[in-house]
Image: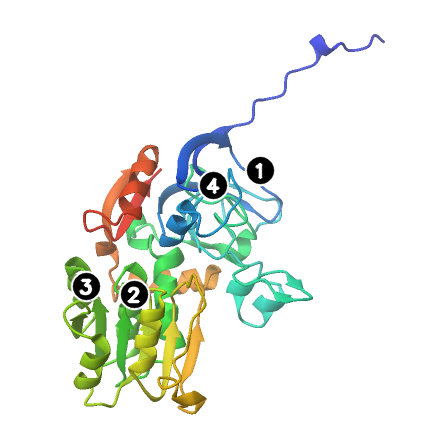
């Protein structure tokens, strides 16, 4: 039997390619061609139909949050299952789904303790914070034609065909995060709540506070379009922080009592401190902001540690059950977040979309990227 020469060997099939927005260097996220992801037995390959740009993506763009060069960015996918791993059950190819921005394994210590977002690897120095955030952070994300969804059975959630992509686009991150701010505050019927900052997350926190039974919601911002949207989302009173001191205004509005819950949705020392100062004794500060430097807790605002105030932090809750709940809220019609999408681009124009969103031009709230 004669040996097979190199010339006689069959040529391997060319790996399929796709378009993807990748991090090149600080200040540059560009659309490039790269291989379609391979999947393992517990994964799913999702053909992305719609995605969006998050403020965290802008932090990556500016070099304020480090990721590997060549990484596909994005963590908010709506799409259709293209391929399922051999061990994935309960889903089918061609099914319309979303996956949360946070994709927990479901079996780690953090998950089993009920904190799926903190699904990181334990070390002798403790847990890796935000370990559940993988898309566009530690693995390729979804600003692309295809994305690999890890641990698919724990993370995919079917989308009712009666709902459009844009109706459910906020579920993977913005809605889940904003609602977590309201939930962590432990809002009760009859509560007065203050929400500092009315960007997309703060607006969702306002909507979540309304759903949870807050009967007076005071919001703080200065952008006219966001202040108007805040009322649509459920705010009873809106404060322009450039016109008045929000702490003084809120304390006057509440006759010196303070609010039951203050939600901080910007991530600055000033807003954190203001949220702490407007709390009643025993109130809760629910923090959603991502802080880029050490926070200081003022002695008087914290009552020297004796004011019985609580500070709760949150990372976007993920996993299929969380996504199911977010989809149920949208399906019920009790919250309509469609108005948060102010601009629309195709994937081919994603670099222009980044330029718009990063510079907060033209009244942008959220950008829908169709793929």
Between the C-alphas of marks 3 and 2, the distance is 13 Å
How many angstroms separate mark 2 from mark 1 (CA)? 37 Å
Q: In the rendered image, which residue does mark 2 sit on? A: 202
Per the model, the C-alpha gap separating discs 4 and 3 is 34 Å
Question: Is the residue marked by circle 3 packed among few (<14), some (14-19), or many (20+) residues within 10 Å?
Answer: some
Sequence-first tag of 3 and 2: 2
> Can you give x and y, in whole percent of width and height, for residue 21 in the image?
42, 38
Judge whether 216 appears above or below 333 on screen.
below
3 or 1: tag closer to the N-terminus: 1
The secondary structure type at the circle numbered 4 is loop
Please give the residue where the numbered disc 3 appears in the rendered image: 222
Residue at 28% in and 82% down = 278
- Residue under numbered circle 4: 72
**What element does badge 1 sit on?**
loop
Residue denoted by label 1:
38
On screen, residue 66 versus residue 170, left or right, reads: right
């Amino acid at each position: 039997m004669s040996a097979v020469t190199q010339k006689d060997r069959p040529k391997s099939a060319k790996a399929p390619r796709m378009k993807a927005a990748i991090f090149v260097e600080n200040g540059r996220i560009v659309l490039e061609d790269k291989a379609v992801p391979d999947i393992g037995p517990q994964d799913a390959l999702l053909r992305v139909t719609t995605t969006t740009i998050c403020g965290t993506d802008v932090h990556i763009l500016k070099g304020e949050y480090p990721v590997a060069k060549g990484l596909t960015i994005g963590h908010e996918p709506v799409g259709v299952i293209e391929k399922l791993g051999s061990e994935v059950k309960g889903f089918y190819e061609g099914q319309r789904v979303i996956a949360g921005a946070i994709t927990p394994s479901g079996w780690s210590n953090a998950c089993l303790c009920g904190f799926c977002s903190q699904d990181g690897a334990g070390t002798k120095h403790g847990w890796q914070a935000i370990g559940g955030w993988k898309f566009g952070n530690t693995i390729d994300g979804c600003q692309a034609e295809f994305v690999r969804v890890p641990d698919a059975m724990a993370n995919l959630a079917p989308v009712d065909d009666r709902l459009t992509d844009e109706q459910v686009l906020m579920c993977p991150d913005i809605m889940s995060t904003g609602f977590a701010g309201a939930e962590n505050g432990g809002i009760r019927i009859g509560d007065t709540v203050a929400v500092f900052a009315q960007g997309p997350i703060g607006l969702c926190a306002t909507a979540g506070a309304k759903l949870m039974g807050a009967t007076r919601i005071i919001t703080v911002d200065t952008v006219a379009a966001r202040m108007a949207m805040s009322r649509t989302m459920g705010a009873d009173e809106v404060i322009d922080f450039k016109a008045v001191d929000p702490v003084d205004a809120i304390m006057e509005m509440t006759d010196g009592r303070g609010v039951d819950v203050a939600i901080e949705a910007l991530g600055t020392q000033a807003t954190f401190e203001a949220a702490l100062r407007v709390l009643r004794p025993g109130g809760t500060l629910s923090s959603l902001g991502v802080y880029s430097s050490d926070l200081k807790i003022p002695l008087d605002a914290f009552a020297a540690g004796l004011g019985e105030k609580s500070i709760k932090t949150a990372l976007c809750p993920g996993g299929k059950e969380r996504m199911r709940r977010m989809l149920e809220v949208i399906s019920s019609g009790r919250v309509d977040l469609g108005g948060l999408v102010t601009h629309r681009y195709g994937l081919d124009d994603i670099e222009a979309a980044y330029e718009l969103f990063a510079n907060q031009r033209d009244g942008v709230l959220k950008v829908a990227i169709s793929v």
